[in-house]
């Protein structure tokens, strides 16, 4: 069904209404039913969406997220603020020890990026809150370096695929081939009760995801022990790019939050990470790629995350050009930009979660990256396509890149947030023209 006749202002109202409906008291669930808690990177995008009309609420979202931060600086991928029985695996399966129950793994560190965006818009009276969140983000970045790059290589590792935020990307197929399907936890999938099983990860994949949870719970979620036993250890190109971009945001915040003394520490990590990213450039495929740290192999799959180094100054001008050309090629093939997995890959499936569908949040990040590297019209094309898909198919979780169909959960918070950001950007563009 097409909703073309509906004016943009009406969609803005709907997007705000989705955020209001998913508000559980200062934090926002990704969508009703399927995801009934606070998710880490969802919240960062949601906060940016709120910032287009309510700075106080935007900061509140991040404050509630950091209520889940562990003493060692880790920010969990889920904060279980209130009980719900519509999701598996819940707090009992994770068995962590935080005051508020949380999961034991993390997610892409968008926090500092969101905070910088909010700080840019906020009045001076919010400075104390911003400074507190700045310190939470700083502790988090230190955790990433210590716990997930203990050898100081400049690339941080994920120990669970859910940490990538791109749960079942074909990049993880090879590393998962070594992860057993055995679990000591009884698997009670709830996701397939909300959404068609053909769009979700397969059962065999799910058993491996839970095998990892069992393994880390058995070592008490201790970072050194987890690192030592990790059956899954991957330097995800998405998270590494986002972390470097987040460090840059943090550096800007250090100056405005009156903590310039933190700058050398942040800059040192940034320098290491730039060098780290250069080591995962595939000369053969002309792309940045994830690396399996257990086998040492680059994971040769073109995914949307492969474009995220554009968010940073790590790519050379030549590498940036190659990435832009790859995007043009995907679009010429007829797919909506940016499919989570390129349609030319054998693992591509247009409707199955991160094996093909398009996510508005990833598009937003890639557009920021294109702009940074001087391709404003490429950024416009991606965002206009995303906006049109939402206006046609609703505020869905994700979109089929071949048909444009809206899939997964509906009334999705981060899609609503990105919609608000896109409309605002479009307005600014029009005013500047
Ligand atoms: C899925 C996605 C993840 C997201 C979560 C909540 O697990 O893969 O990226 O954070 O849903 O929306």
Image (cartoon, grey):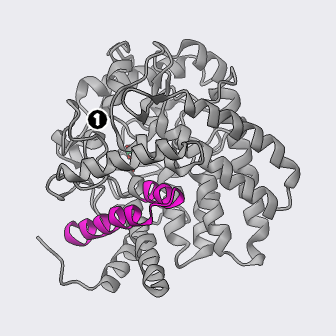
**Residue, x 32% and y 69% (percent of image)?**
384
Asked which quadrant contains residue 139, the reply is: top right
The N terminus - image quarter: bottom left
**Residue, x 74% and y 65% (percent of image)?**
129
Where residue 319 appears, x then y in whole percent? 47, 41
> Is residue 18 or residue 48 the one in the foreground?
48
Decide if residue 262 is on the left or right side of residue 244: right
Decide if residue 52 is on the left or right side of residue 11: right
**Residue, x 59% and y 60% (percent of image)?**
114
**Residue, x 14% and y 56% (percent of image)?**
403
- Residue 67: in sight, yes or no? no
| Residue at the extreme left of the image, as rendered | 1
| 180 to 210, vertically: above or below | above
| 427 to 421, vertically: above or below | below
Where residue 187 appears, x then y in whole percent? 31, 27
Residue at the disc numbered 1? 189
Where residue 70 appears, x then y in whole percent? 67, 39
Where residue 387 appears, x then y in whole percent? 31, 69
- The magenta stretch spans residue 381: yes
**Residue range corresponding to the magenta coloring:** 364-393
> Is residue 278 or residue 112 the one in the foreground?
278
């Amino acid at each position: 069904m097409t909703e073309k006749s509906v004016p943009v202002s009406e969609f803005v109202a709907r997007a705000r209404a989705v955020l209001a409906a998913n508000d559980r008291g200062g934090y926002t669930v990704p969508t009703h039913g399927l995801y009934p808690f606070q998710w880490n990177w969802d919240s960062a995008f949601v906060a940016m969406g709120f910032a287009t009309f309510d700075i106080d609420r935007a900061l509140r979202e991040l404050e509630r997220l950091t209520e889940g931060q562990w003493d060692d600086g880790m920010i969990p991928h889920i904060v279980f603020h209130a009980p719900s029985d519509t999701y598996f695996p819940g707090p009992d399966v994770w068995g962590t020890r935080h005051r508020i129950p949380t999961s034991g793994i993390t997610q892409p560190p968008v926090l500092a990026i969101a905070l910088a965006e909010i700080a840019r818009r906020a009045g001076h009276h919010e400075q104390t809150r911003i400074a507190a969140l700045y310190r939470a983000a700083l502790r988090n970045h230190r955790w990433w370096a210590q716990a997930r790059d203990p050898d100081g290589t400049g690339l941080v590792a994920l120990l669970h695929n859910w940490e990538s935020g791109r749960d079942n990307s074909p990049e993880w197929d090879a590393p998962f081939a070594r992860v057993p399907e055995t679990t000591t936890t009884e698997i009670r999938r709830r996701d397939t009760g909300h959404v068609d099983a053909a769009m979700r990860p397969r059962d065999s994949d799910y058993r491996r995801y839970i095998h990892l949870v069992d393994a880390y719970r058995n070592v008490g979620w201790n970072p050194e022990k987890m690192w030592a036993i990790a059956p899954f250890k991957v330097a995800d190109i998405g998270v590494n790019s986002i972390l470097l971009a987040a460090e840059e945001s943090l550096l800007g915040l250090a100056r405005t939050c009156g903590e310039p003394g933190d700058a050398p520490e942040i800059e040192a990590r940034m320098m290491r990470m730039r060098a780290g990213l250069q080591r995962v450039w595939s000369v053969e495929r002309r792309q940045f790629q994830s690396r399996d740290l257990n086998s040492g192999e680059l994971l040769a799959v073109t995914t949307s995350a492969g474009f995220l180094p554009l968010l940073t100054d790590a790519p050379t001008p030549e590498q940036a050009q190659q990435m832009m050309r790859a995007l043009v090629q995907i679009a010429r093939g007829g797919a909506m930009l940016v499919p989570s997995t390129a349609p030319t890959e054998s693992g591509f499936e247009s409707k199955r979660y991160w094996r093909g569908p398009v996510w508005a949040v990833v598009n937003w990040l890639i557009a920021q990256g294109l702009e940074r590297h001087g391709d404003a019209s490429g950024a416009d094309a991606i965002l206009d396509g995303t906006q049109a898909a939402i206006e046609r198919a609703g505020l869905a979780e994700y979109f089929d890149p071949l048909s444009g169909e809206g899939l997964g959960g509906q009334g999705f918070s981060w899609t609503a947030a990105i919609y608000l950001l896109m409309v605002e950007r479009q307005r600014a563009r029009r005013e500047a023209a």
